[in-house]
Image (cartoon, coloured by chain):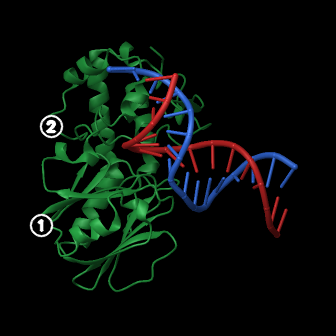
Chain colours: A green, B blue, C red
Amino acid sequence: MPELPEVETVRATLEVQLGHPKIVGVDVYWENILPQGSEFFKQKIIGQTIQAYKRRGKYLMFVLDEDMLIAHLRMEGKFYIYDQPTMRNKHTHVVFHLDDGRELHYNDTRKFGRMEIYPLAEDENYPMLKNTGLDAFDERLDALALYKKWHPKKMPLKAMLLDQTFLAGIGNIYADEICFACGLHPKTPVSHCSKKDFENILFHTRRILAGAVKAGGTTIRSYTSSLGVTGLFQLKLKVHARENQPCLICQTSIKKIKVIGRGTCLCPKCQKRK
DNA sequence: ATACTCCCCTGAGAGC
DNA sequence: TGCTCTCAGGGGAGTA
């Protein structure tokens, strides 16, 4: 499932491989990918040139001449670039035709991904981003401010990490890694976390996400590859997907539990509940 | 304000 | 072998 590092890898790859073509046509094969409707979407996007590629949290953003195209890949959304007209497969739902003869295909096995288009504006004004906080790497993030806002809450730590209004970009895999790095049990109530814990959370969030970006993301389960992107961070995971394997610190067997309904891996010895 | 539940989808894996 | 059943999973919407 693409989280921040995987989306960043896709963004960087699009920047290099797709460049700045003009979109001259769009074919839509599954309406629900485009909540604004395919006719509206086509009418807006056709004729515009891709000027830049941005990202906020797990959202991929295409800066066009007049509008911003925002995509969320959810679990399995992928983009593929083809040098010439290419037959779509059963999971290709949107095909963008480019002025240089190439095609950009949006492929999504579970059809959970979404794309919307809005006139260029500040991030805060895009409806699709209204529940998205600052990106994990945004310099405006401040551990003390986060502590003041969140520590009254009783929700488990992992729920806060997955809440995109806390900061944007963490998904299930990295949430487990962050909890482990902080030595905190994912069920620890946020209200039991100290200022120092919040400093650690922000520090390790950025350290782990940056390491994953550098590795090209994590290739695991449903998130296989997109644009020839095959990340290697799965080799550096310390708890996630390591159920029943020894903890790399203390050799205790990694346990898998449910936290807010999500599969969660942890070391029962290194991660104490506060 | 906060916390649930459901929904969207498909394929993988389990059970028979 | 092949069928049916269950479940994961990000985030929005609706409800208690």
Mark 2–mark 1 distance (CA, rounded to whole Å) = 27 Å
Total numbered labels placed on residues in the image: 2
In this view, A89 is above or below A140: below
Residue shown at 46%/57% (left/top)?
A: A76
Q: Earlier in the sequence, mark 2 or mark 1?
A: 1
In the image, what residue type sits under mark 2?
Answer: Glu
C10 vs C1, left or right, is left
Q: Tell me the number on the disc at residue A65.
A: 1
Q: Pinpoint residue A56: horizontal percent, then vertical percent.
A: 24, 47
Residue nearest the viewer, comparing A259 with A28: A28
**Dot in front, 2 or 1:** 1
Q: Pinpoint residue A224: horizontal percent, then vertical percent.
A: 47, 60
Quadrant where the C terminus of chain A is found in the figure = top left
Mark 2 nearby-residue class (10 Å; few <14, some 14–19, many ≥20): few
Q: Tell me the number on the disc at residue A139.
A: 2
Q: Secondary structure at mark 2?
A: loop
Q: Pinpoint residue B9: horizontal percent, then vertical percent.
A: 54, 58
Image quarter of residue A131: top left
Subunit ID for the residue under disc 2: A
Residue shown at 12%/63% (left/top)?
A: A66
